[in-house]
Image (cartoon, rainbow, N blue to C red):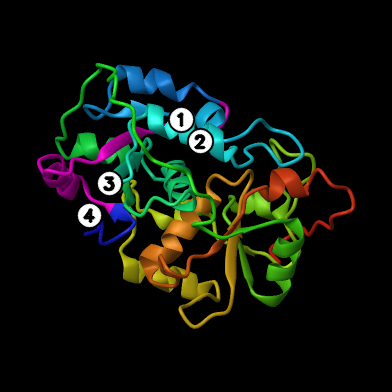
Amino acid sequence: MNAFPSALVSPADLVSLLDSARQPVLLDVRWRLGGPPGHDEYSAGHLPGAVFLDLDRDLAAAPGAGGRHPLPDPADLERVLRAAGVRADLPVVVYDGDNGSVAARAWWLLRWAGHGEVAVLDGGYAGWVAGGGATGTAEPSPEPGDFQVRPGGMPVIDADEAAELAEDGVLLDARAAERFRGDVEPVDPRAGHIPGAVNAPFSGHTGPDGGWLAPAALADRFAGLGVDAGSGPVGAYCGSGVTAASVVLALEVAGVTSAQRPAALYAGSWSQWSQDPARPVATGDH
């Protein structure tokens, strides 16, 4: 039986799971663009038993032609997950600092790799602490896991397919509005967005407290962007394939997509697209 009825798990439900016979593996993936290193925050306090994974080192391949955070090699990912204690027969809970935008990358990777029981902690570490959850500073040495990475559990699209989806379906851009419009571009070679994409900033998934919006509210948000359960193909991208995973998660929580019919992820995202001078760039709100 799947431990998670949703791709999100509340702090209260996680407390119950931690007292159950099938205690979930906890993965701390706190990370911020431009730093400071997430491990510093982890060392200062984390959920007891949680193992820290670094986005750049553990959850992505080296930057290059595939973008700033290409998908990791399956063998490398399997080694990382096993070292963290991930097992095929145990659920996994991943969390970041607050809004789930980075934890969603780990959730997505585990699903892509074939793990069927994984959820993001709603509200992240901040929500856990605010709810009185226990914390500690000891770094665990987990028993090695046995999880086998079998890629293909989540759909991935390349640049050509992203362009087609923007024209024939719905391609959601998870970046902030000013980056989508091309007003600013602090990281990548060119400013703007993939022609035909629709802006859906990942910050809109959560409320002021960092907790995720209710499914109905998420569904209303996506309906306002022209996406509902009756829509055609839908996919997402962002700067480097990280926060776009939270759009994939939010679509599932909203009921627009499902675990059996998830949205596609353009893993290379803008960091790959903008490297290629032959790729067209749109600016403005459309």
Badge nearest the viewer, 2 or 3: 3
The residue type indicated by label 3 comes to Asp
Q: Is residue 101 left or right of residue 132?
A: right
Q: CA distance from mark 1 to mark 2?
A: 5 Å
Q: CA distance from mark 2 to mark 4?
A: 23 Å
Q: CA distance from mark 1 to mark 4?
A: 23 Å
Which disc, if any, is residue 193? none
* Residue placed under numbered mark 3 in the picture: 89
Label 4 crowd bin: few (<14), some (14–19), many (20+), radius 10 Å: some
Please say whether residue 269 is one of the residues in the magenta stretch.
no
Which disc, if any, is residue 80? 1
Say which residue appears at 79% left-offset and 39% top-offset. 189
Choose the circle earlier in sequence order: 1 or 4. Answer: 4
Which disc, if any, is residue 3? 4
Check contact, mark 1 vs mark 3: CB within 8 A: no
Q: Is residue 31 in view from this perspective?
A: no
Q: Which residues are magenta?
A: 9-34
Secondary structure of the residue carrying numbered label 3: loop
The residue type indicated by label 2 comes to Leu
The residue type indicated by label 1 comes to Val
Q: CA distance from mark 1 to mark 3?
A: 17 Å
**Looking at the rendering, in which quadrant would you find the N terminus?**
bottom left
Check contact, mark 1 vs mark 2: CB within 8 A: yes
